[in-house]
Image: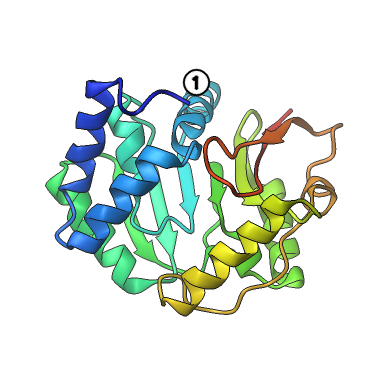
Amino acid sequence: MPSITANPARRACIERIATRFASRWHQGYARGKLKLDPVFDDAVEWARRAAASVSPASILDAGCGLGLLAHWLREHDVGIPVHGVDSDAPKIEAARAAAVRGALSAVDFATSDVRSAVGGGSVFLIDVLHYLSLPDRADLLASVAANVPTRGVVYIRNGLRGKSWRHGITRLEEWFAHVSGWLPGRRFPLPDESEIGRHFPEAQFERTIGPLWGRTPFNSFRLAFVKR
């Protein structure tokens, strides 16, 4: 992960994004996430692949929250259209306002259940699956696998079930986010790799799976699938 303290351009990029939000809480959250979470840099490379492989290309950012991924992509000259959806209406309102302040092009946000938002483009699911029941996330993953176009990207970053200390800290962090009201709704067990991977058989999808925790203590993994 790039050094934060040694990279003034990176710090300036993060600050530009953070100050697009009206709320100081949202500004602080954006700074922290963009500084510490390796998913954004990793997702840029997969978004570039999605943009180069499919025409016309688009990304569904399912469970987009404040829409930070769209900002990060634009700051890194990735112009693929992004449609963000989230069931949290206040976050979507903040995402829309920040996108206007940042003059983001080909970006829109909608309040919607991620399970009904799947279309025909690449799909990014970042920290979403454990907020769905097992039947609901199975239905979502099946729908994503069926609808993503040839050469389209399915990018999943999620904590995975395990027995390590990272798993315990991941569950503790999710509990705190729930009781604080930042992530309302019921939490469900973390998925494991086989639960996700069975929807993307190797005969139909290229797969790239590996840890993505960076400097965080969480049991986060990237599971990326490209339709053959």
How many numbered circles does the render carry?
1
Amino acid, disc 1: Ala
Up-down relation of residue 28 to residue 71 (above or below) = below
Up-down relation of residue 194 to residue 209 (above or below) = below
Left of 136 or right of it: where is 88? left
Left of 105 or right of it: where is 215? right
Nearer-the-camera pick, 83 or 10: 10
Up-down relation of residue 32 to residue 185 (above or below) = above
* x, y percent for residue 32: 35, 47
Using the rendered image of the protein, determine whether residue 69 is visible from the camera's viewpoint: no
* x, y percent for residue 36: 42, 40
Residue drawn 50% across the image and 74% down it: 178
* x, y percent for residue 158: 63, 50
Residue drawn 20% across the image and 52% down it: 98
Question: Mark 1 falls on what kind of element?
Answer: helix
Pointer 1: what residue? 52
* x, y percent for residue 113: 51, 69
